Amino acid sequence: HGTSRINQLGHLEIGGCDAVKLAQDYGTPLYVYDEELIRNKCRAYVTAFQESGFRFQVTYASKAFCTMAMCALIEEEGLSLDVVSGGELYTALSAGYPADKIHFHGNNKSPDEIVQALDANIGCFVVDNFYELELLNALACERGKRVDILLRTTPGVEAHTHEYISTGQQDSKFGFDIKSGQAIEAISRSLALPGLHLLGVHSHIGSQIFETDGFVIAIKLLIELLADAKEKDGFEPTVLNVGGGFGIRYVDGDTPLEPGDYVRAITSTVRTECESRNMSLPELWIEPGRSIVGDAGTTLYTVGSSKTIPGLRKYVAVNGGMTDNLRPALYQAQYEAALANRMNEAELEIVSIAGKCCESGDMLIWDVSLPEPKAGDILAVSSTGAYGYAMSNNYNRIARPAVIFVKDGEATEVVARETMQDLVKNDKLLQKQNR
Ligand code: LLP
């Protein structure tokens, strides 16, 4: 997909770059991002909204993959940016990303993080709970500010997705519950707080969603809530944010829709619901994360040891694992792989790809068809662009891989490989006399 193909050497090529050469030049494991594919995804969302006639913001959920180069690319594509921590905010600002296009999410923003965002004059806070409503109001008032907010609501919709990543159902740590009346109460309260300017409401119903029905149901509930708020408080929203969660293809059998299909379902539902209730059309915001970067990322590993249990299974180990991709261990997520240096070989066997961590659960792929892998082969795992680097860690004191962007045959390193020195740079020894 994207700009990937097989070159004359029988090697995998991404963005015009030979993956085997990339592995030689930058080492492995290596995260490789197809820059054109990321840009095309951004444009697909923007174009679909432009065709809808709605005023809109496409906001990239940076939790999926947040680095300075990525924030700069998102600015070039004209997207807004969603951050969920002081760290993501700092990364965006360090990249020169414009503060007024940053939206701050999170269910437990600290006072320090709120002050950091207020001082930077970010565009919008998505307020999650009553505690935050009061805290943000107090900190804004102290600074003589009135800040734009959305209220995150939980409409009670369960997206058909893995339990751990469903966030829209009623029993969730996120947002103001609509069913029990918390959401309408939060609207009334925020209208009365002098440091806050309520723009509208938000919901995010889950992640890796392949259908549009969840969005349709959630939108109906949100617009019903807004109709109640109009009747109760005379509140008319300017913004409706329906979150992210648009799915991508990881393996055969995954059936995501195109960005435009999701957008058209959203815009037509909002139009119908608003017209039937005689409400003016709000500005529409969405927050795709995974679908912007997921399938643009490929991780390259070097094959090392292997172990065959006769009649049972062959394990092939690579020089990374749950430290660079936690998703298989955490969500039983599935991936596809190929040998980047032997793309044209027809004789295949079924093997399981193990990571190198001291943990039995550190398996990247169970049962994948590959040419008999040998030590030194380059294994390419596809669709690792979202929540791979973002959830990477230093378990077993393994250094994080480098990240490169490829485009038109050129590679640019956007995150350097961590060094051994990086691993100990915050460590301190006990003083001898304390022992
Ligand atoms: N907006 C909000 C408020 C969210 O909570 C999320 C994701 C997004 C947008 C972006 O969702 P996306 O378009 O990327 O599906 N670590 C998990 C995914 C967690 C998603 C959490 N929230 C994984 O690797 O599957």
Image (cartoon, helix red, strand yellow):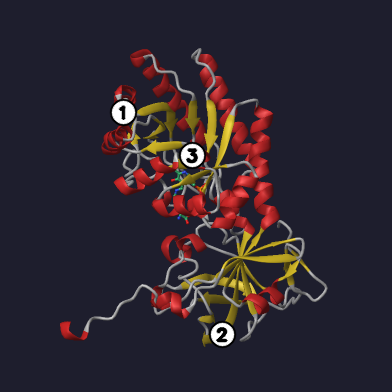
Q: Earlier in the sequence, mark 2 or mark 3?
A: 3
Compared with 174, 323 (above or below) is below
Q: Position of residue 328 (x, y in %)?
A: 47, 65
Dot 1 beta carbon under 8 Å from ligand 1: no
Residue 105 in view in this figure: no
Identify residue type, mark 2.
Gly
Helix, strand or loop status at disc 1: helix
Helix, strand or loop status at disc 3: loop
Q: Is residue 236 left or right of residue 427?
A: right
Distance in Å between CA atoms under marks 2 and 3: 41 Å
Mark in the foreground, 1 or 2: 1
Identify residue type, mark 1.
Ala
Residue labelled with disc 3: 243
Q: Is residue 277 left or right of residue 253?
A: left
Q: Position of residue 329 (x, y in %)?
A: 43, 66
Distance in Å between CA atoms under marks 3 and 1: 19 Å
Q: Position of residue 2 (x, y in %)?
A: 71, 56
Choose top left, top right, bottom left or bottom right for residue 50.
top right
Dot 3 beta carbon under 8 Å from ligand 1: yes
Dot 2 beta carbon under 8 Å from ligand 1: no
Distance in Å between CA atoms under marks 1 and 2: 56 Å
Identify residue type, mark 3.
Gly
Residue labelled with disc 1: 186
Residue labelled with disc 2: 304
